[in-house]
Amino acid sequence: MFKTLVNAFADKDIRRKIFLTFGLLLIYRIGCYVPIPGLNLAAVNSAISTTDFNLMNLMSAVSGGALANGTLFALGIIPFINSFIIMQLLTLIIPKLERMSKEGDEGREKLTQITRYIAIGLAIVQGIGIMVSWDNAVNPMFGSKIFTQILIIVILTAGSTFVMWLGERITEYGIGNGTSLIIFIGILSTFGTSLIQAFGTLGKNINNIWRIIAFFAVLVLLFFLIVFIDLSERKVPVKYAKQVRGNKMVGGQSTYIPMKVNSGGVMPIIFASSFLMFPQMIIGFWPQSSAYKFYNQYLGVNSWVYPIALFFFIIFFAYFYAQIQFNPQDVARNIQQYGGTILGKRPGRETSEYLAKINNRMTLFGALFLGFISLVPSLVFKAIGGDLGLTNAFSATGMLIVVSVALEFDKQLQSQLMMRHYKGFLQ
């Protein structure tokens, strides 16, 4: 990866894209420290730290601490992620949206525009929910508390919309997926803050150093496991028959179809977490209601039902995302059109069923791995350094996001280098 970075910086165009990406991410991080007017920041921190469930803490970790600090980008990219999930589900249900998704660039642009509108609507709803939880932290401006609350909701919505715009600009003009990089940089900043706090406890108890070392040891092992699974794939061999075209003989080559174990990366976890967080945020509008107390106790983030629901939703979204990314019918059709065959399988339906069977098996293994990595290591981190603040420093989900985004960023750089130095790579 370091060699790829060196080669990338040697290319003027790629270097410009990298600096543009870093610049836009820097703008995002600056916005995470710009306070919202009309808020008592100490009261905001108190409201989040003393809450009886860690939903706000989870959202704050994704936003890099912006929510806990009551800043401009407190909502972060979460409304856009929820909107993207909703649109993907609706595309499978509504025929008109499905047809639109197959209309090429024009259809995708229409779907993207609808996704933006839904994201803005969700940002307003989530802004109202957060405003309810911040009610005691509002300092009335111009003698009106209602005016101040409306202004804060508008600022939260505008900040989330701007973050969405930054993510799109990174994807279009920079390197990598903008949404993933924004989440990536937020998790890294949270890790740095938590680590500083953990080392700060050494002055009171020097023996905590061994717990910090144990935390890093588990962290390294999990990093190796995540990288190993993320790079694992099954190669399905394909043989192309020789064909005569004019005076030339073409074909006769052997290749393979790479099918990754974890083809969806971290997206199933992001989808599942966002999907489960949204109802709790909505019902949080009425914190004194019996429904809120019931949901918080039996279905909330700290309940015993939540990790079970998260596990099964991860499996569901892993299969859902795999179906979006890999269509065995289309792959089998393309293989047949170019005169290719999978050894021992007839072209067409039999090939399609064979590829679907392999894809389902690989997806199941990848989904079980995601379910394991999202739950079990978090319990280990809590046992090692729960009172040191290391539980939120690097959750297993956060590690998976960091590794997946870093590997994807490296692949993007390699593809950019390949495009610009294609002849050099062939020689």
Image (cartoon, grey):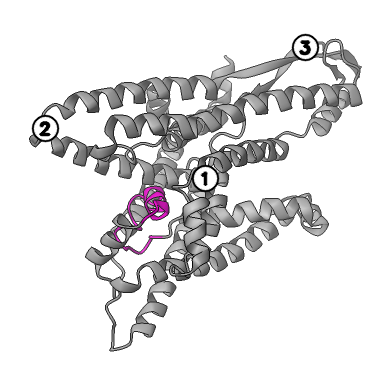
- Residue tagged 1: 306
Amino acid at dot 3:
Gln
User: Which residue type carries mark 1?
Assistant: Tyr
N-terminal of the pair, mark 3 or mark 2, is 2
Q: Are marks 1 and 3 in contact (CB under 8 Å)?
A: no
The image quarter containing residue 361 is top right
The magenta stretch is 52-74
Magenta region includes residue 53: yes
Count all numbered tags in the image, as a single digit.
3
Q: Earlier in the sequence, mark 2 or mark 1?
A: 2
How crowded pointer 3 is (Cα within 10 Å; few <14, some 14-19, many 20+) is rated as: few
Q: Main secondary structure of the magenta part?
A: loop
**Outermost residue, bottom side:** 143
Residue 268, picture quadrant: top right
- On screen, residue 7 versus residue 99, left or right, reads left
Q: Which mark is residue 205?
A: 2
Q: Is-magenta flag for residue 208?
A: no
Q: Nearer the viewer, residue 66 or 18?
A: 66
Locate residue 117 relative to residue 277 in the image: left or right: right
The answer for how far apart the CA atoms under marks 3 and 2 are is: 65 Å
Mark 2 residue element: loop
Q: What amino acid type should be assigned to the residue bearing mark 2?
A: Asn
Give the residue number, with chain letter if any, for mark 3.
253
* Residue at 77% in and 34% down: 327
